[in-house]
Amino acid sequence: MKHFTTIQPLVQHLAGVRQKGLTIGFVPTMGALHNGHLSLIRIAQQACDVVVCSIFVNPTQFNDPRDLEKYPRPIAEDIKKLEQVKADVLFEPAVTEMYAGNEHWHLDIGELEHLLEGASRPGHYQGVTQVVKKLFDIVKPDVAFFGQKDYQQFLVISKMIELLHMPVKLIMCPIARETDGLAMSSRNVHLSAADRHNALILSKTLNNLKQRFDINQIPKLKREAEQIIAAEPGVELSYFEIADAETLHPATINTPHIVALVAAKVGNTRLIDNLVIS
Ligand code: AMP
């Protein structure tokens, strides 16, 4: 695996790849890699000739400095995992390589960035679009792979690509889960044994909703889900929404595609999950 920490040598290397007529797949991450990340790399390998993975804990998308500080960074283990799955290129820049001092510019992609996660974490998606725009400009991938785990992030990046006419195709990859249903996340390492158990209420409630789903009962089903999660010890619900899968507005009886999304603090760790309902 080729390992780059600066932009210019990576750009040169990828220009050579492109010259050979090979396609480039890109999997951006913040590291602390788990099987969810590795599944994205495997999907990218099926679709593209050369797979680039980036590891960059992007400071501009954290609205809580303590969250940024305690974000796990096991880089030596990450490199081993990437070598095991035979990723071709790792880009692991320092913050100073990506940002020239205090950058205040951001893309206004409209209301999507202010709903749900955007409302709970003001400025989060401005940081996400800022760094993904920079990474796309550097890597110039043919295809970029993102997880359904961050469903709203996928919609935000799709919107950015549409607005800026960026020549990159996006693929949404399924959520990798532990055998008991917990969505894999780099933040799961912060869960105590009790948190780990309590966190299951999120995926259980989503699955239960899907099984019982009735489009005529959306407000009632949402209320019940909220109550069940709020009643779980050690779990502080941020939101549970049954939403239009394209706009993330609350779903109605006329909504064709529906996704349920949840965010909650479990112990001191904020977790998100979602499930496509119809
Ligand atoms: P992160 O390192 O958390 O920024 O995630 C990097 C990429 O991996 C994003 O596209 C995430 O949606 C994706 N991802 C994170 N967790 C999972 C998971 N459990 N299953 C599938 N993809 C995931």
Image (tube, helix red, strand yellow):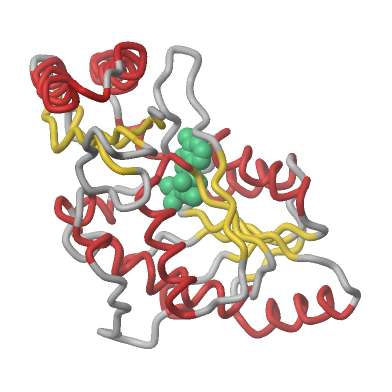
Q: Which residue shows up at 24% across the image and 38% down it? A: 251
* Image position of 46 with respect to 135: above or below: above
- In the picture as drawn, the residue positioned furthest to the right comes out as 20
Q: Which residue shows up at 14% across the image and 15% down it? A: 228
* Image position of 199 with respect to 129: above or below: above
* Image position of 62 with respect to 266: above or below: below
In this rendered view, identify the residue nearer to me: 268 or 28. 28
Q: Which residue shows up at 60% across the image and 71% down it? A: 5
Location of residue 57 (image quadrant) = bottom left
- Residue 119 horizontal side relative to residue 50, left or right: left
Q: Which residue shows up at 78% across the image and 60% down it? A: 50
Quarter that holds the C terminus: top left
- Residue 78 horizontal side relative to residue 192, left or right: right
Does residue 64 appear in the picture of this structure? no
In this rendered view, identify the residue nearer to me: 130 or 73. 130
Q: Position of residue 97 (x, y in %)?
A: 48, 80
Q: Position of residue 173 (x, y in %)?
A: 56, 42
Q: Position of residue 236 (x, y in %)?
A: 11, 29
Q: Position of residue 128 (x, y in %)?
A: 36, 64
Does residue 236 appear in the picture of this structure? yes
- Residue 185 horizontal side relative to residue 77, left or right: left
State the count of labels.
0
Quarter that holds the N terminus: bottom right
